[in-house]
Image: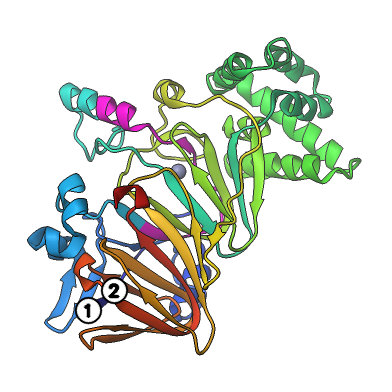
Amino acid sequence: MDLMINSVRPYAWGSRTAIAELLGDPTPSPHPQAELWIGGHPADSSVLDTPDGPRPLHQVIAEDPVGQLGSATAERYGARLPFLLKVLAAAEPLSLQAHPSAEQAAAGFAAEEAEGIPVRSPNRNYKDSSHKPELICALTEFHALCGFAEPAKVVHLMASLKVPALEHYIALLSWQPDEHGMRALFSTIVTLPSSALEPLLQAVVAGCVARLGDTRDPELTAHYRTALELAERYPGDCGAIAALMMNRITLQPGEALYLSAGNLHAYLSGVGVEIMANSDNVLRGGLTPKHVDVPELMKVLDFSAGDREILRGESDGHGETVYRTPVAEFELSRLVLTDGMVRELYFDAPQVLFCTDGRLTLESVDGNRVDVVRGRSVWLPAGAHRVTVSGEGVAFRATVGTAER
Ligand SMILES: [Zn+2]
C-alpha cells in the first residue's frame, strides 16, 4: 500500500477554494480547480509514492494486473482499474448531460470508429466502449438537476410563470402527461432555432423574476432561481428552460445520488466525492461551450419521470456506510472512525482510501504502515489482504462492486 499523488483538473467551472482547502494549499488557488482525480485513468493517472520512487498507478497495474487488481477483476476488466474516484468542486453549473448504457456505448463507439472520427476530436461522442454510471456523495450542500420531474409538476411550474409564449409548449405535456409528452416537449425545446428560443428565454426570465417577488413556495422559488442563474451564465442556451422540466435536488453532506444510464443531469454547485466507471462517454444537451449532440443525446435519454431517490447509505454499525448501486465496476462507502476504534479491512479487490477529515493510520499484517491525512489517499492492491485502519477521521473507500466478488 502506498500514498497517492493526485492531479487537479482546472476546468473553468471549478472552485478556487474547495480543493485547495482539502489539500491544505493556499486559497484562493491561482486557477479554478474543478476535479481531483484519484485513480489510474491513463489521461491523468495518480502517482504512487513507492519506496522505489514515484510510479504512475496505471503503469503499476499494467505491469502486474493480477497482483494489483486480483484475478477476478483483472480477468473481467483487463489491466486497468474499472473505476475512477474524483473530488468534484463546482463553483458554477456543469453541462446538461447523460451517459449511454453499455450496449449504446459499444454501438456508438463502433459507429464512430467506422466513420473514422479521431478519438481526440472535439466532436467525438464515444471516447471508449464502456458505459459510465456514476454516484456523487456530497461533502458540502450540493445542488443538482437530476432526471425529469413528474409531468403534473412540470406543467404546474411552467404554468406558474404566466408566460403566454410558453402555453403552446406546456400543452405538449399537459395533453400527454407521460414519457411521450416529456420527450415531445424536451425535443422541441432543445431543437428550437435561436429566432424562436431567444424571445422565449427572455419571456421565461421575465416570468421567473416576476414570480420570485410574489411566491413563498420554496420548491418553485428554487426552480425560478436556478433557471435565472442558468440563463445568466449561458445566455441563449435552452438549458434554462429544460431545467424547469427536471428534479431540482439538494444533497446534504453524506447524502448521495446515483445516476444510471440515460438519466439527464446537471450539477449546479457544491463539493462532492464522485465515483464512476472508468469511461469518458458524455452526451451533452447544453450549458456548455463543449460539443453538443442533441440527436445522439435523444437516443440515450430516459424520459421516465418522477422523484429521484436520495441515498443515505447502509450502515454496518461499525463506522462504515455503503452506498449500494447495481454497478459491477464500483462500490463507494464512507468510514467514520473515532479515536480508539480499530477496523480490519478484508478484501480481495483493489481499493482506494481517500481521507476527507482527520488522520488515519493503516497497518498491514506484514508490518507496512501508512498515515493518511485530510486530502490524501492510499492505494491498496488486491494482494494486500488484511489491513487495519485506526485513528480519528473520515475516509471514502472505493472498490470494485460486490457483484464482482
Ligand atoms: Zn455525468
Ligand 1 within 8 Å, label 1 CB:
no
Q: Do the residues labelled 2 and 1 touch (CB within 8 Å)?
A: yes
Residue at 50 percent of width and 89 percent of height: 340
Dot 2: few (<14), some (14–19), or many (≥20) neighbours within 10 Å?
many
Residue at 60 percent of width and 64 percent of height: 140
Residue 288 appears at what percent x and percent y? 48, 40
Q: Nearer the viewer, residue 237 or 91?
A: 91
Q: Is mark 1 on a helix, strand or loop?
A: strand
Dot 1: few (<14), some (14–19), or many (≥20) neighbours within 10 Å?
some
Q: Quadrant of the N terminus?
A: bottom left
Ranked by sequence position, the earlier of labels 2 and 1 is 2
Q: Which of 318 and 278 is in front in this view?
A: 318
What amino acid is labelled 1 in the image?
A: Asp
Residue at 52 percent of width and 34 percent of height: 264
Tell me the distance, in whole angstroms, between the alpha carbons under discs 2 and 1: 6 Å
Which stretch is magenta?
Answer: 85-108
Decide: is 76 above or below 400.
Answer: above
In this image, 393 relative to 100: left or right?
A: right
What amino acid is labelled 2 in the image?
A: Met
Residue 34 can be seen in this image: no
Residue 279 appears at what percent x and percent y? 30, 44
Q: Name the residue under label 2.
A: 4
